[in-house]
Image (cartoon, rainbow, N blue to C red):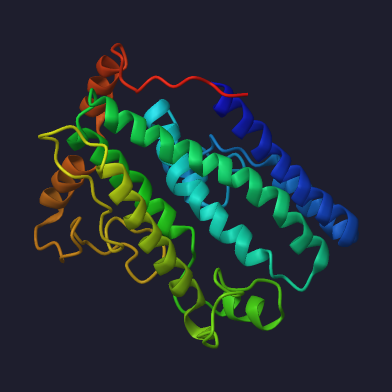
Amino acid sequence: RKSAMRIMCEEQRHGWQMAYVLCNYFGDHGIREAQKLLERNSSANPIRGEEDRPRLLGSFNEPIDHWLDFFMFTHFIDRDGKFQLKMLSTSSFKPLAASMGPMLKEESFHLGTGANGIRRIVTQGVIPCALIQKYVNKWVSTGLDLFGVDESTSAQWAYVYGIKGRYDEREADEPADRDHLNEASRMLYFEELNKEMERINARRKEGEPALFIPSDKFNRSVGKFQGKRHDLKGNPFEGNDKEWEQYLDEALPNDEDEAQLKEYFKEEWIQYREWKD
């Protein structure tokens, strides 16, 4: 709970920090944009018929109903945040670049909380890996969507004007492929997720199936795979609409899974860890 409270406070601070940059460097227009930024409501999801100022990016409108969702969000979505912040840390607009250091330090704690939380759940072995996998499937696709559209001209111009660099800008030897900037960052993110999953799988109890990162084609809402039907392994889905809905019900958390999870939460479902101040 202390970790959750710290993360919520720091994420709010990130919003205020960006509002400060907007207000101080972009005049009246910046003030209006900062106001709109601070008015957005993460619980307002147009998919559920809620139109009152939702967040712009899908992941931030997804409900976080319990601790497993919380750890998944901080592991997968805050990891995307690390990528975005590092890309902005090379910005030629100094006030923006200078804001990234403190935010990256805080983001490291957020995604570390998620990774450690999932490892502790898997180590404890109360919640079956087959059930955990469905929540991995849910959150990975939204994390991949956060990198934006493919062949993005916005990303290209942001790079040309020095607003936003590549994730590995300081380390890269090759010139940037300006036509595929979002794709390159997304692939680095995807590779990192797979490496992290190897560490998580090392904690599995004997007999539990290995967790895996689903294909970057599965259940996508942004990019070239948007709206296309691929299974968890990336193969084209050949069934009809009804069969596709049934497949998604089996691959993603459903009401039955949520009810089952609540029962597991009544047990010692996560490895105990002493809090260190």
Taking depth in this image into account, of 51 and 204 the one nearest to the observer is 204
From the viewer's perspective, is residue 87 above or below residue 105? below
- Image quarter where the C terminus lies is top right
Viewed as shown, does residue 3 lie left or right of 14? left
Q: How many marks?
A: 0
Is residue 107 or residue 226 the one in the foreground?
A: 107
Rendered residue at 22%/36% (across/down): 204
- Let me know if residue 48 appears in the view: no
Q: Residue furthest bottom?
A: 175
Residue placed most toward the observer, 177 or 2:
2
Vertical comparison of 171 with 77: above or below:
below
Which residue occupies 22% across, 45% down? Answer: 211
Q: Looking at the picture, does residue 230 appear above or below residue 90?
A: above
- Residue 141 x/y as whole percent: 35, 54
The answer to whether residue 47 shows anywhere in this view is yes
Q: Is residue 228 left or right of residue 189?
A: left
Whole-percent x and y of residue 143? 43, 53
User: For this view, does 125 lie left or right of residue 61?
Assistant: left
Q: At x 56% / y 54%, what residue is drawn?
A: 82
- Tell me where residue 156 appears, x and y as whole percent: 59, 80
Query: What residue is at 25 percent from the left and 40 percent from the top?
Result: 134
Can you tell which quarter of the image residue 75 is in?
A: top left
> Residue farthest to the top?
266
Q: Position of residue 62 (x, y in %)?
A: 45, 40
- 171 to 128, vertically: above or below: below
